[in-house]
């Protein structure tokens, strides 16, 4: 489940989206279901989780990807902002819903942290959102803590990308470019 625009936008790219790359690689072996909702945060996702994830799944799911934090981490006062304590609680509840509703085992859930960002580029494209690498690191740490607590797998995208921010990773400072999809 990736309800951030980072997942949704990538799936929309015909040749380079990470979801599409996985779907192409495992064509006729796996069915890929993308539940990315552009602009959503953990709070809005919990309000709509029953619409996003069916109570009785049509398929057996072997792997789930949970990717939140970029939208939650906007500055306080903006509608997308979710305070850190609530973010951690919401992420834990999302994991619980996936385990309870569709039967994915926690060790088959992959929690991706929010990545670092190109602050200058992001502020130019989306002024006033208040996303900073310091704030993204804090939300990444919370995602890692939830993954550890719930015994989920995780990928610390913040750390993986942090040394490569100036290498064209992003189209706008936040959303991944095709460069990192190759």
Image (tube, helix red, strand yellow):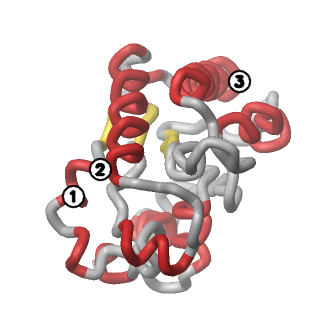
Image quarter (top left, top right, bottom left or bottom right) of the N terminus: top right
Up-down relation of residue 95 to residue 57 (above or below): above
Distance between the Cα atoms at labels 3 and 1? 35 Å
Tell me, yes or no, if residue 103 can be seen here. Answer: no
Q: Nearer the viewer, residue 44 or 105?
A: 44
Task: Residue under label 3, please give it.
Answer: 101
Rendered location of residue 5, percent (x, y): 60, 62
**Which of the two discs, 3 and 1, sits closer to the camera?**
1
Q: Residues within 10 Å of mark 2 (few under 14, many from 20)?
A: many
Q: Secondary structure at mark 3?
A: helix
* Left or right of 36, for residue 176: left
Out of 109 and 123, give the one closest to the viewer: 123
Residue mark closest to the camera, 3 vs 2? 2
- Mark 1, residue position: 162
- Residue 60 lies in quadrant: top right
* Cα gap from disc 3 to disc 2, whole angstroms: 29 Å
- On residue 158, the disc is 2
- How many residues crowd mark 1 within 10 Å: few (<14), some (14–19), many (20+)? some
Residue 36 percent across, percent down from the top left:
64, 56
Residue drawn at (34%, 69%) of the image: 118
């Amino acid at each position: 489940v990736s309800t951030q625009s980072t997942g949704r936008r990538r799936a929309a790219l015909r040749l380079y989206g990470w979801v599409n790359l996985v779907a192409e690689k495992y064509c006729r072996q796996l069915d890929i279901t993308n539940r990315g909702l552009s602009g959503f945060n953990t709070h809005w996702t919990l309000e709509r989780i029953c619409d996003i994830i069916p109570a009785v799944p049509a398929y057996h799911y072997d792997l789930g990807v949970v990717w939140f934090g970029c939208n939650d981490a906007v500055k306080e006062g903006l509608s997308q902002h979710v305070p850190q304590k609530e973010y951690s609680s919401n992420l834990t509840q999302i994991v619980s819903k996936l385990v309870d509703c569709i039967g994915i085992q926690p060790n088959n859930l992959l929690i991706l942290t929010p990545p670092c960002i190109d602050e200058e580029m992001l502020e130019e494209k989306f002024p006033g959102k208040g996303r900073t690498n310091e704030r993204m690191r804090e939300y990444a740490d919370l995602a890692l803590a939830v993954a550890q607590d719930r015994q989920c797998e995780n990928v610390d995208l913040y750390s993986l990308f942090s040394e490569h921010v100036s290498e064209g990773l992003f189209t706008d400072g936040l959303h991944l470019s095709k460069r990192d999809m190759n």
